[in-house]
Image (tube, helix red, strand yellow):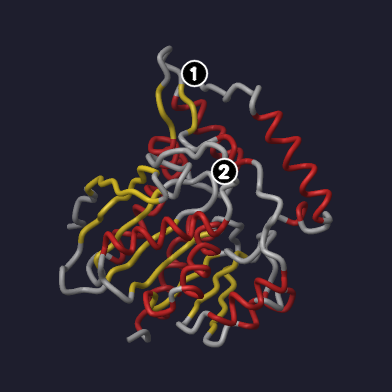
Amino acid sequence: MEQPLNPSSHYFHSHRLKLHYWDYGGPDDRPPLILVHGTQDHARSWDDFAREFRREYHVYALDLRGHGDSAWVEGAMYAFPEFMLDLVAFGGVVQRFPAAIVGHSLGGIVAMHYAGAFPERVAAVVNIEGWGPPPATRTKTYTERLRTWAERVLAAESRTPRRYASIEEATARMKEANPHLSDAMAAHLTRYGTNRTADGSLIWKFDPYLRNLPPLGLPTELARELFAAVKCPVLCIRGAKSWAANLAQSPQLQMIERMQYVEIPDAGHWVHHDQFEAVVDATCRFLADVP
């Protein structure tokens, strides 16, 4: 019989922010596995994944700043180094090194920053589509990105967050954003990704300012340096139907010294939801070879 999943909720502090994580448990003598979600997502999106791995690992999932049950930031950009700082602080909470890290999208980029800057803390990284921004942002010059960012920040200050009358309405919006999701996964993501307001309507937990990407990004030269600094084994997983660049189109990925690359058919950007079993299988085989 499948064990019930009942992770415990905890808080810690990073950069004067109160941040949240879930502890899924696991054998105390097993190595830690840290799961890091993507932009506008939350830690409970990893529930099924955590269930598969908590027999062999002590599994944790982090709500990055501005996401899930972690605090929002005022007067900051939500830049990659700031998210990495949260992972550094969380490592101090776990106090077990080196740890394996699985990150999706933003979480994958954050994991790579952490592995490059703190190589002694990271045993391996499974990077699910965490190596570049959406195509619409790639062609803009820095000055264009800077102007767009400033205009969107000002516009966000007067925008009212969209409210949903019911959980069904919010779930429908979740499926609209990712048509590959099953009904059950869409409902799960919505349940843990929304808050009730005073009038009973629902709003998303993530900070609306996260919709506006920082103008700095990760220039190719810095990406090359960062990825070259990552010395642990790295598994890069891409969905065949995703907008993310493939290996041949991503010279920075080729800087990773110990890199494996897997492309999953019939999957978009949320590969671990679209083709769950294939991602779990690839991750298991990869981590089995990590000391």
**Residue 220 image position (x, y, % from top left):** 72, 71
Task: Indicate which label's residue lies in the foreground, 2 or 1.
Answer: 2
Q: Residue at x 55, y 55 (%)?
A: 270
In the figure, 143 relative to 239: above or below?
above
Classify residue 242 as left or right of residue 39.
Answer: right
**Quadrant of image for the N terminus:** bottom left
Q: In which quarter of the image is residue 174?
A: top right
**Residue 282 image position (x, y, % from top left):** 45, 74
Total tally of numbered discs in the picture? 2
Residue 96 bears which disc, if any?
A: none
**Residue 9 image position (x, y, % from top left):** 25, 45
Q: What residue type is labelled 2?
A: Ala
Query: Which sits earlier in the primary sequence, circle 2 or circle 1?
Result: 2
Q: In which quarter of the image is residue 196?
A: top left
Residue 165 bears which disc, if any?
A: 1
Residue 76 bears which disc, if any?
A: 2
